[in-house]
Image (cartoon, helix red, strand yellow):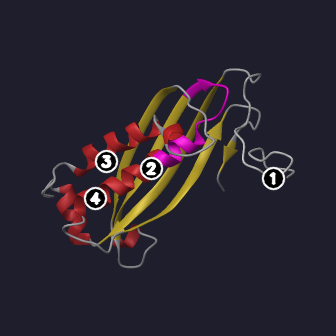
Amino acid sequence: MKGFTHFDREGRAKMVDVTEKRMTKRSATATGTIFMKQETLNLIEKNRIAKGDVVTVAKIAGIMAGKRVSETIPLTHPIRITGCDVDFQFLRPAMSRQKGKAGVKITARMKTRDATGCEMEALFAVSCAALTVYDMCKAVEKEMVIGDICLLEKSGGRGGKYIKR
């Protein structure tokens, strides 16, 4: 299957061989949002969620997830993460893409020096951080929606630089 590197000539899944690729500096940034009611966001901001400090726990979950992608997503390579940061921005309903909903925008930045990139690590970090926010707040609100998860940019490797338009 031409164009897809994770398939062999018969169309069966395979792990890409990166043995001969050079170890180079690479980075990736991903983002996503968990949308919720303003009241739920207020509780998060005031640290009034019964399970504890939502942002700190979600940040740690995102970092941990980014370091363990190859254990969960088939065909990804274990890579050495050399830097990771997960940030949170509180969104008021007027700033949100979901009409009338507040939210938490999550951004993960990953760095590595390896033979393959860290885009999946950044995306997975955002996803797990958002799921952690949901888990910690579900007793207050079950209607939260996770979305808009995407790669913002990446650098390094054969593909060079990518910036989302």
* Mark 2 vs mark 1: in front: 1
Q: Amino acid at mark 2?
A: Val
Q: Is residue 139 left or right of residue 31?
A: left
Q: Which image quarter holds the C terminus?
A: bottom right
Q: Secondary structure at mark 4?
A: helix
Determine whether the residue tagged by mark 3 lies in a helix, strand or loop.
helix
> In the picture shown, does residue 42 fall above or below 126?
below
Disc 1 target residue:
11
The quarter holding residue 48 reads: bottom left
Q: CA distance from mark 3 to mark 4?
A: 10 Å
Disc number for residue 58:
3
Residue at the (56%, 31%) spot, across then down: 78
The mark that comes first in sequence, 1 or 4, is 1
The amino acid on which the numbered mark 3 sits, given as a three-letter code, is: Ala
Residue located at (33% from left, 67% from top): 92
Q: Residue at x 24, y 57 (%)?
A: 136
Residue 116 lies, in percent from the top left, at: 66, 31
Q: Amino acid at mark 1?
A: Gly
Q: Amino acid at mark 4?
A: Asp
Q: Are marks 2 and 1 in contact (CB under 8 Å)?
A: no
Q: Which residue is under mark 4?
A: 135
What is the crowding at mark 3: few (fewer than 14 residues within 10 Å), some, or many (at least 20)?
Answer: many
* Residue that badge 2 annotates: 126
Q: Is residue 96 above or below residue 76?
A: below
Q: Earlier in the sequence, mark 3 or mark 1?
A: 1
User: In the image, which residues are magenta?
Assistant: 112-124
